[in-house]
Amino acid sequence: MIAKCPSVLLIYTGGTIGMIENPETGALENFNFDQLLRHVPELKRFNYRISSYQFDPPIDSSDMEPLYWAKLVKIINYNYDYFDGFVILHGTDTMAYTASALSFMLEDLSKPVILTGSQLPIGTLRTDGKENLITSIEIAAAKDENSNAMVPEVCIFFENHLMRGNRTTKINAENFNAFRSFNYPPLARVGIHIKYEPHLIRKADPKKPLKPHYLFDTNVVILTLFPGIQESIVESLLHSKGLKAVVLKTFGSGNAPQKPWFVRLLKEATDRGIIIVNITQCSSGAVEMERYETGIHLLQAGVISGYDSTPECAVTKLMFLLGHGLSHKEIRYKMNSCLIGEITKKEW
Ligand code: ASP
């Protein structure tokens, strides 16, 4: 029997990775994907079937929007049966938001969706883009001993770590090691070998069809607390027209000022049906509102725990749940449940 050659669809959305330096002007210009093989001839050595799709025009990831997430999901859904895995080339700035959003949108995913990018364009001499691209393709095509995808998850691969996408945050604006997953260990470490951690990787059921989701409601805001925060500002923010949910970035293990005006404003907002989710400003660790009196006040005001969620994940999860017309009660319940490995809760 002839073994089927692995197949990967590359989707280029934009960002530094897909740029080359114009040798005459020195300016960075967007890469034409038809020329991919010319710039990364190493891809030929894979012996894979690699196809590509390019956003036209490519976008800087600062312009990323739910509309583009829906476009990515449409492309993946349309091509789902024809490829073993998908690699999304994306600007690094908002990659963690896209990875989080896709993890909720691609329900029952059983194939790898690997996001990657680079700090230096693929056409420059010291680029980190080639290695990131080549390793991501290898991971997207990797199978286990039963011929199932090795990593059936939405992930970010960067530098030498494969991370669960909805656990990842950009932590450095210039180092090659630009992403970190503080609250969940890497799914694979990459050196001479790619060392997968099967016990950390989500188990998928390849018999289940992919269920794509497209809807988002963006009436959410992130409010970061700081000593000296003003009552009038918090009040006007919580009365913003259309506001449906707030990601509240609190201190330490979920603590906030105990001032009566602050707790009152939060309580009034939750009574009006606004969902307020408490996550910590710290890079790692979880919210435990029962631990200090300052946290208990928040619980009494109707604030719910975001556990150890990243801000990127908390905000995209809220947008996703709000977009699906769920009741207030259901959204609060789902925010406190682990849907796709995004928070540390025992039942998952
Ligand atoms: N501004 C770029 C972007 O996120 C930076 C990068 O690609 O790393 O699209």
Image (cartoon, helix red, strand yellow):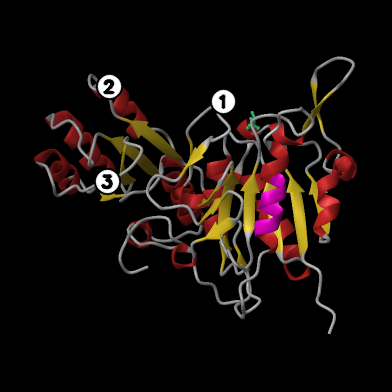
Instruction: Please say whether residue 319 is one of the residues in the magenta stretch.
Output: no
Which residue is at 17% across, 36% downward? Answer: 263
Q: What percent of the width, then of the height, locates residue 299?
A: 18, 48
**Crowding at mark 3 (Cα within 10 Å: few <14, some 14-19, many 20+):** many
Which residue is at 45% across, 47% downward? Answer: 313
For residue 227, side relative to residue 134 (left or right): left
Q: Are marks 2 and 3 in contact (CB under 8 Å)?
A: no
Q: Nearer the viewer, mark 1 or mark 3?
A: 1
For residue 42, side relative to residue 120 (left or right): right
On the rendering, which quadrant does ligand 1 occupy?
A: top right
Frontmost residue, 292 versus 132: 132
In the displayed structure, would residue 233 be above or below residue 341?
Answer: above
The secondary structure type at the circle numbered 1 is loop
Q: Quadrant of the C terminus?
A: bottom left
Q: Identity of the amino acid at label 2? A: Ser
Disc number placed over residue 232 in the picture, else none: 2
Q: Calculate the distance from the C-alpha at mark 1 to the C-alpha at mark 3.
A: 40 Å
Q: Quadrant of the N terminus?
A: bottom right
The secondary structure type at the circle numbered 2 is helix
Which residue is at 37% across, 49% downward? Answer: 183
The secondary structure type at the circle numbered 3 is helix
Magenta span of residues: 133-139
For residue 330, side relative to residue 265 (left or right): right
The residue to which callout 1 is attached is: 174
Frontmost residue, 42 versus 238: 42
